[in-house]
Structures are given as C-alpha cells and as structure tokens.
Amino acid sequence: MHDLLASVTLGAVLAFAAWWYLKFRYLLPAERRLRRAEKELSGFAEFARESLEHSSVPDSQEHYLDIAEYYFIKLHAIFAGGVLAAFERSGGGWRVAGLYSEQRSGQSAGAVFAWEPLDRCVNEGEFLFQAPLDPAPPGDLFAGMGSALLCPFMPTHGGYRRVVVLAHASPRKVEEALPYLRFLMPYLNSVWRMAEKNFALKKETEQLKGELSAVLQELDAAGSRLIQRAKERKALYEVVTKATGVEKDMSLGCSAVLNIVAKIAEADVAAVLLYDDSRNELVAHPGSYGIPDDDRLLYSIPITNTSSASVRAFINREPFMSPDAQNDPDVIGHHAKLWNIRSLMIVPIVLGERVIGVLRVGSLKPDFFTPDQLEFLTIIADELAMIIEMTTLYENATRTAQELAQLNKLKDEFLSTVSHELKTPLTTIKGFVSVILSGEVGSLNEQQSNFLSVVDQSANRLTHLISNLLDFSRLNGKVEMEFQPVNIRELVSHSIGNMLLKAREKEIEIESRFAGKLPDVYADSRWITQVIDNLLINAIKFSRRGCTVKVTGQDKGEAVVISIEDDGPGIPEEERKLVFEKFYRGKNSVNQVPGTGLGLAISKSVIEKHGGRIWLESPSGNGARFNFALPVHKVKAQL
C-alpha cells in the first residue's frame, strides 16, 4: 500500500515537473511569440487600414511623392533606429532622393554614386534582402546597420526609377518590416501606375483643351470672316438690287452703292471719280457719300498729275491704301485735307479692257482700313463698273426711245394731217371723174373713157389707202370704241353680202358655216366689220379663180372664234411672223396682188384692243386660214 502511494506521489511530482518544464521550455516562448505576433499584426493592420483610408490618386508627380513620403515617415516611426532612404537614378549612377533617419547625412545632396545592389534590385524587379550589407554602400549613410531590405519603386516601361532601402542594426527588425514593405511598395507602385495614366490623361486633356481652344479660336475667327463675307454679299446684293431697281438714274445708282460701301466699311467718305475724256481729268461725280456738293464740284484731278494716288491707281490699274493720307508722301496732302481724310483706300474701276475711273473711300481715323476691306472694295468696284455701264446704256436707250417716240408721234400727226388734206381733193377728183364718165358734160370716145376709168380706179385705191392710214393712226392713238353686245354671225353675214360682187368677178364662191347658235360678243361693230372685210378681201385676192372661200364660226365657251380660209398658194413659214406687221407684203404678192400692207396690221390692233387674239394657220402650198377670237359678252345676273 505504501509502495503504491509512493509510486503515485512520485508520478504526480514527475508529471508536475514535466508540465512546468514544457511550459517554460515551449509554451511560454510560444505565448510570447504569439503576443508579439498579435502585436505586430495589430500594428500592421492599423498601418494598412490607415494607408487605405488615406489612399487617393495624385494629380501630379509632386503630389505622388508627397503621398509616398507620408507613408515612409510613418514606416520609419514604426521601425525607429533604422535608416529609410530613397534612391533615384541619375545618369550612370544613383543619388539620394529622400532620407528618413535621425542624424544621418549619407551622400551629400546631389552626389552621384554607384552601388551594385541597387542596380540588381532594379534589374530583377524583386525585393532584395542583404545581411550583412555586402558590398557596403559608399559613405556613412548605413554605418552601423547590419542588414537591409531593398524594394523597387516607381515602375516605368524600362524598369524602375527609384529604390527604397530600409536598413537596421537588427536583422529581426528588417524581417519585421518585410510585411509592411510588401504591402506598401506594391500599393505605392500600383498608385504610381494609375497616377501615370492619370498624368497622361491629364496631359492629353490639357492638349485636347489647347487644341479645342485653338479650334474654337479658329472657328471664332472663321465665324467672324463668314459674318464679314455675309455682310459683303448682302452689300453686293443691295448694290445690285438698288442699282437695277426702278430708279435707273446713274447718280442715284452711284449714291446707293456708295452709301452701302460707306456702311459696310464704316467709312466717312466715299466717292467715284470717273474719267472725263473731254477734259482729260478724273472728276468727282454725283452721288458721293460724305462730301458736300460744292466740294464735289471743285474736285478734279488731271491725268497728267501722277503725284496723285488716284491718278496712279487709274493708270496702273492697281489698288492703293494709306494709313495716314495727310502725312503720306504718296498722296497729295491738299486733297486729303480737303475732305479731312486720314485713312484712304483707292481702287480702279475697270470695265473689260477699259478703266473708267476710281473708287475712293476714306476715314477720319488713322490706320483704320484692313487688306480685307481693300479686297472687298475691289469686288465692289467691279460691280460698280457694270452698274455705271448699265445705267449709261439705259440712259442712252431711254433718250433714244424718247426721240423715237417723238418721231413716231410726229409721223402719226403727219399721216393724219396729210390723210385729211388728201381726202378732200381726192373726193373732188373722184366726183368730177364720175360726172365725166356718166356723159353729163359731153360724150367721150373709147380711149378717153378708158383713161378716165384708170383714173377712177387709182382714185379709189388712193382713197382706200388714205382710209387705212387714218384708221391706223387712230388705232395708235387713244381711239374710243363703242363696246356693246354684238351678234357676230350677223356681222359676218353682212360682210359676206358686201363682198359677193368682188367674189363673182373671180368666179369665187363664199361659203359660210356656223356650229350652232353663237353667243353675242362684246365689241365695237364698226371696227369688227372692218376686220372681217379685210380678211375676206385678202382671201378673195389670193384665191385662185373658181375656188371657194370658207367662213366658219365656233363657240369656245369664253370666246367666239371666226375663221376665214382660202385655197391660195399659202404663206411661207419664214413670213408668218411678219404678215401682221404694218406695210409688210409677202414676197409673192408684191408684184401680183395690189394692196397697202396695212389691212392685217389694222385687224391685229383692233382685235387686241377688244381683248382678243388673231393668228394664222397656213400649211405649205395649201391656202391660208386666218382666225380671230373675241370674248363672249357676259350678262350680269339679275337680283
């Protein structure tokens, strides 16, 4: 029993001793290591959390280095007693770019040195652990440090730009710093990559902004030019519109142009100096802008005066511009001071191969005009040349038309007077010839009777001609017609009855055919009867003996159409547009058929005064058909 108790007691003592041995030998160091690891992990977690909380994308390299320096300072505070330095490539070596250590100077600022571990770290792109430092870095930067950790920093396309070195006397401290650096350096490197992209985007954005600003400036300049060109085109349109409007007087046309020129160029004076070949001078013409009429009348320059800029522009056909005409040796100062001009532009006015004058534009301000304005003035001068020529031609044409109208009036008055004066003696001659032919004053032999018959026929022809001349003269004047509802069918039948005797002389039959009842026309029966008579006489004259003249009438709704057709030789196509001209007679009828050439001209004038139309249809070699249309009389509705 005692042995058993002793054995149990001994086992318990041995077990207790073994437990304490294991605790002190293994468990307590493990607990210490665990607490240290927990402390290290807590510090690392706090460092990582704070780093992530302060993370941001820098907007410049300086901003990025400030962020990196912030973390390096915190890291050095955690591993106090060591040396934390950043090295940067410089030429073929390295220099200190940042130093985070107390009372350490290392290499002097800016000094370049070589250290193989830095090259190897950059080339391999990996963390490099050195314990001990071999080879030792130059200088005393890492004096007393037993080991170091080298980390590549700020990656580029060809490697890394910098290396961060953490050195400490205790290798264990360097090992403890490894997780921090393995977290911090990839984080900073990734931020740098994003920053580089951000820098590139920012640079590209700035470049794009610059390009956009340049484009906007160019667009603004182009817009200004377009606005200026639009103003110039508007000015040209106004020039042409005003000059070609109802007011064709040259002085008014020039005035309109010069007002527009002064407005678009913001000028104070604008004048046209045209060449007067009778005086061999350039003379200011009417319509000048900003110049009193009295001064304009005094302004003229002899072509021989080549000291004048206007004369030189006229002779050389080259534009001229002066920023200060009053002090310019190429300008006659007296002329510039006459209108108080400082800035001056002069361009020649050229029409084809001929220079007709110069356009002179001035401003009271010095150095006011631009080359663009001079170019625009040249364009205006080209338009002005055509306008001046056009207005001159119009004036000449107007003057000629007035002279022709006056001559025509005199001619009509002469015809009317002569016709009246001839009609009275013709009536007397015809009366006495008729009395002699009747035998009331004695018997006549055959030869005397034949001679008097010829005289009687000639008197009749002359009477007919005089009547036509009087009618034509009245139609060209203000003849008053008595319009009323007229039965056109009765007028046609009456005219046919009057022409039957003439038709029988040539054995010609007149056939009339009307398509039903024709409505009344609104006309002067006397004049329309004369039209029908003229057309029937012509049809009988030109028809062959024994043929038929056809007269037809049709109701066309708004108008009644009367047609008179013969079967004569017809009218050649080249003569159809001339048959209604006064005194015109066809080539085939001049020597074969008597006539005055006024019948169709009178008929056309009468029909047109009735608001109708007359026309010709003539198939070649197969007669001619003359048609005229008269408007139908419209009866007003009874209320």
Image (spheres, rainbow, N blue to C red):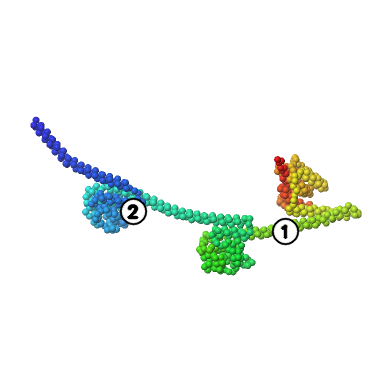
Residue 112: horizontal and vertical position, in percent?
Answer: 29, 58
Most extreme residue toward the left is 2
Which residue is tagged 1? 407
Of labels 2 and 1, earlier in sequence is: 2
**In this orientation, which residue lies closer to the viewer: 10 or 264?**
264
Most extreme residue toward the right is 442
Per the image, label 2 sits on a secondary structure element best described as helix
Q: Amino acid at mark 1?
A: Leu
Residue 385 numbered tag? none
Q: Amino acid at mark 2?
A: Glu
Residue 251: horizontal and vertical position, in percent?
Answer: 62, 60
Residue 385: horizontal and vertical position, in percent?
Answer: 60, 60
Mark 1 surroundings within 10 Å by alpha-carbon count, few (fewer than 14), some (14 through 19), many (20 or more): few
Instruction: Give the CA separation, mark 2 to mark 1.
Output: 100 Å
Per the image, label 1 sits on a secondary structure element best described as helix
User: Is residue 540 visible to us here?
Assistant: yes
Q: Residue drawn 58% across and 69% down?
A: 305
Residue 108: horizontal and vertical position, in percent?
Answer: 27, 58
Which residue is tagged 2? 62
Tell me if 234 is positioned left or right of 141 in this view.
Answer: right
Query: Above or below — where is 262 with respect to 13?
Result: below
| Quadrant position of the C terminus in the picture | top right
Tell me if 609 is positioned left or right of 222 in this view.
Answer: right
Mark 2 surroundings within 10 Å by alpha-carbon count, few (fewer than 14), some (14 through 19), many (20 or more): few
Q: How many labels sit on residues? A: 2
Quadrant of residue 31 within the rendered picture: top left
Tell me if 447 is positioned left or right of 134 in this view.
Answer: right
Query: Above or below — where is 587 with respect to 24?
Result: below
| Quadrant position of the N terminus in the picture | top left
Most extreme residue toward the front is 639
User: Is residue 614 visible to us here?
Assistant: no
Q: Residue drawn 71% across and 48% down?
A: 611
